[in-house]
Amino acid sequence: MPELPEVEALAAYLRERAVGHTVERFEVSSFSALKTYDPAPSAVAGLAVTGAGRHGKFLDVSFGDDLHLVVHLARAGWLHYRDTFKSPAPLKPGSGPIALRVRLDDGSGFDLTEAGTQKSLAAYLVRDPAEVPGVSRLGPDALEVDRDQFAERIRSRNGQIKGVLTDQEVLAGIGNAYSDEILHVAKMSPFALTGKLTDEQLTTLYEATRQVETDAVARSVGQKAAELKGEKRAGMRVHARTGLPCPVCGDTVREVSFADKSLQYCATCQTGGKPLADRRLSKLIR
């Protein structure tokens, strides 16, 4: 799933490439992906692309003075920028993985796509991003809080730190992948309880969050959209590296699997050498 660094990089790419151009057509192929009906997609035609930004993991493309296309790319969604399109013909409903297409006045534009059969990509055409339910519920951005605000937000939820870090109502932008990386840098178990974290541990966790997310943004911004996924994988220390050596200590990276996702960690760096139980009903080692 695209997280804070990738969405920031996509927004930066759109600011560089699309801002200032006028929309010729806004086309919808997957009607289930567009969650709003007013304003209508036709309202975008003739408007200039005036900006691109993000709200946590939501991409926000602005048109004219008061229209926003807010997109959550979900697990398998992505943005593909096209210098030219193969055909000038409008998209037909159900055009493969393409959910939405924005054609610009210079012949370029971008597609929002989603692979697989479980379609979760969500797009909203709104006058105010706060109209999007997921945006209105977001906590402060993970890169915009200071140490004390960070500690306050983490302590506002009782639970395992992995789940609290990825709760978008606590802090916006951190997902499954970068939370693994943050906890590895902080040398903290993903199952450490927030209520038991010391002030020193919270400071370490804050600094790790800043380091991991800032470094990932620096690596990602400036990359072409097509290169971002590879850049993300190349920069990972433990996430999606099960069975490979930890780059810090050389121990084997381990995994805990759940029904629909998994986490990766280094036992030597994070849990005092003790493997975490990989069974949902077992007693987790902390």
Image (cartoon, rainbow, N blue to C red):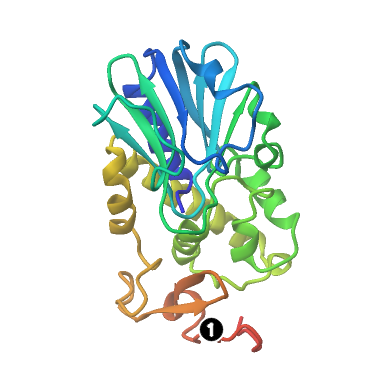
Left or right relative to 40: residue 213:
left
Residue 13 in view (yes/no): no
Taking the spot 44% from the left edge, 53% from the top edge, the residue there is 76
Task: Quarter of the image for the C terminus: give it.
Answer: bottom right
Residue 40 spot, x, y in % from top left: 60, 22
Which of 188/105 is in front? 105
Q: Is residue 158 above or below residue 243?
A: above
How many callouts does the rendering have? 1
Residue 130 spot, x, y in % from top left: 68, 30
Q: Badge 1, how many Cα within 10 Å: few under 14, some, many 20+?
A: many
Residue 32 spot, x, y in % from top left: 57, 43
Q: Hey, what amino acid is under mark 1?
A: Leu
Taking the spot 31% from the left edge, 33% from the top edge, the residue there is 81
Q: Is residue 54 above or below residue 253?
A: above
- SS at mark 1 in the image: loop
Q: Which residue is mark 1?
A: 276
Residue 50 in view (yes/no): yes
Residue 155 spot, x, y in % from top left: 73, 57
Taking the spot 76% from the left edge, 54% from the top edge, the residue there is 156
